[in-house]
Structure formats: structure tokens, C-alpha cells
Image: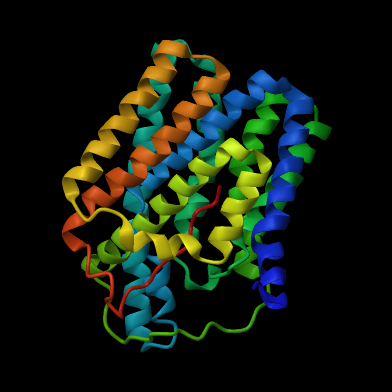
Amino acid sequence: MIKRRQVVRLSLREYLPLLLTAALWAVIILEIGTADAARLLAATVTLRALQMATRLSTAGSLKTRVEARPSVRRQARRFAIRVQFAVLLANVALVALFVAALRSIGQHEVAAFLPLVAIGLPARMLRFSDARTDSPYFRLALAAGGLATALLGWAAGLGALGMGLAFGAREWVAYAVIRWWPRPPHVPQRPTDQPLALAEIARNTAVSGRRLLTYRLTKVALTVFGPVGNLAARTGRGLNWHNRIEPYLPHHLSGFILFAIGTAGVSAFLAMGVGKPVALVAAAGLLQLSAVATNIALMWRWLPDRKDPNLIVEDDDED
């Protein structure tokens, strides 16, 4: 039975962000129409897919070192910044590649939206390389920031440009709120005084990637039930139900590679063969699944035993 504390936590971490996100999309649809709103959604989901493919989990490792020696904290912070800067460069290169690809198949509107949404990439780099941005309410700040920036774009009469910028600017708003909002100091559950190394980041990335894929697959399965399914998926995430399913995912590298290739192929077919706004959204959603599986495959050599007590699982899915 869900306790009162869990209900409050779910409301702040899942349900309120869902309502704010719905309000954000209502503003967008009223401003630019359903077709362009679908193209903007496709661009946003595509960018998230690129981030999923290149993700390297550093935030959890930084949190375990907040009480370490100053030299260890500095080393971990600098190493995390270098890692996330490399991720940022990879994402910028992929955005440029996808913009060219979208233009080549005639999807000029989605191609125009993608760089606008991508202006939030540096904010993401800063957030994942700073232990002080640890907060379970990032999704709430992100949804509220998106609604605020969309309303500003609507008031300024910027049209599609303003709605595209809203999605990039919301990352900066959320980062600023989480970074400077007063909160009690973080107490690490598994503190360490060891320097941060790439192997630790890769190990945590592999495990959190499997759990992210579990949530994504669950959400896709529940989309047939519409808003109720979305609510159920978010409830399951808030209660960590998908983490309990993760150990039952296949433990074979070939399966993840085939899954990544298959979903990418269907995504490309929908984008090039159908090309309608709704098909583009579906293509972007499948691209996310392919991206998560690709990331897991890239980190496969570091995948630890599921019962490893040193694992740090990060919840960085932003919907």
C-alpha cells in the first residue's frame, strides 16, 4: 500500500511535473498548432535519444565524494567536467549530423527545431559535473522552467522560434534553480575517498542504462492506455518498480545489439518512408530505445554483477 509520504513524493516528483508538462504542450499547441507541435516534440525526443546514446553517469560518483578529502573532491570534479565536456562535443557533432540527415529527407521544420532545443546541452554538462545539483526534484524544476519560458515566448510573439527556444532554455532555468536553491547538505550513503576513474563511471552507466531501458519499455507498453498509461509508468518509476524488473532483462550483448539495430531501422523507416508528424514522433521514440540499448552495448565490458554493493544508480530520465 502506498504510504502518505510516498504519495507526497510521487506528487512532487512525478504527478506535478506531468501536469506542468501538459500545460506546456497546451501552450505550444495553441501557439503553433498540432502539426508543428508534433515536429517540435520529435526534435525534443530525438535530442534526448542522442543524449541517451552518449550518456556517462558522473553525478552519483560525485555525490559519494562530497565528504572526501579536498584533493579527492577536486580530482573528481575536474575528471567529471572532462568526461561531460567530451559528451557535450559528441552531442554537438550528432546534432549537426542529424540536422543534415533531416534536411536530406525533407524534414526541414524538425531540423530547424533541433539546434534550438540543443542550446540546453551545456547546462546538462554543468549539472552532471556538479555534486551540488543533486536533487530528486529536477523534473519538477525542468517542467516548471519549460512552462515559464514557453509563456514568455508566447507573450513575446516569437511563435515557433520561441517554443523551440523554450525547450533549450528550460534546461538552464532548471539548472539554476537546482544549483542555488537552499537545501540540507547531502550525506552520501556509500562514501569513498578514492579518486574517480573512468571504469567506475562506465560501470554505473551500464547499470543505470539497463534500468532506464526497463522504464522506457514499460512506458511504451503502457502508451496504449493514453494518459492513464503515462500516469501508471510515472508511478512505477517513482516507486522504483522498473528497477525490480531490470534484473530479468537478458544478459547477452548480442541481444542488445540486435535490439538497437532493429529499433533504429524501424525508426529510419518511419522518418523516411512515412514522414508525417505523428510518424516522426514515433520514430524519435524508437530512436530513444535504440540509443539506450546502444549505450548499454558500449558499456558492456564494465557491466558488473547485479548484486554488486558498490553500484550507484542514477535517475536522470527527464521525459
**Is 267 rendered above or below residue 188?**
above
In the rendered picture of this protein, how many numbered marks are placed on residues?
0
Residue 208 shows in the view: no
**In this rendering, position of residue 102 left or right of residue 164:** left
Q: Quadrant of residue 6?
A: bottom right
User: Could you tell me which residue is drawn at 22 percent across and 68 percent down?
Assistant: 304
**In this rendering, position of residue 263 left or right of residue 222:** left
**Residue 107 location (% of width, % of height):** 49, 15
User: Could you tell me which residue is drawn at 42 percent across and 67 percent down?
Assistant: 59
Residue 164 shows in the view: yes
Give the camera-side residue of 231 and 90: 231
User: Could you tell me which residue is drawn at 56 percent across and 33 percent down?
Assistant: 116
Q: Quadrant of residue 33?
A: top right
**Is 285 rendered above or below residue 299?**
above
**The N terminus, quarter of image:** bottom right
**Residue 68 location (% of width, % of height):** 38, 87
Q: Furthest-right residue in view? A: 155
Give the camera-side residue of 187 and 317: 317
**Is 169 rendered above or below residue 56?**
above
**Residue 248 location (% of width, % of height):** 32, 59
**Is 166 rendered above or below residue 205?**
above
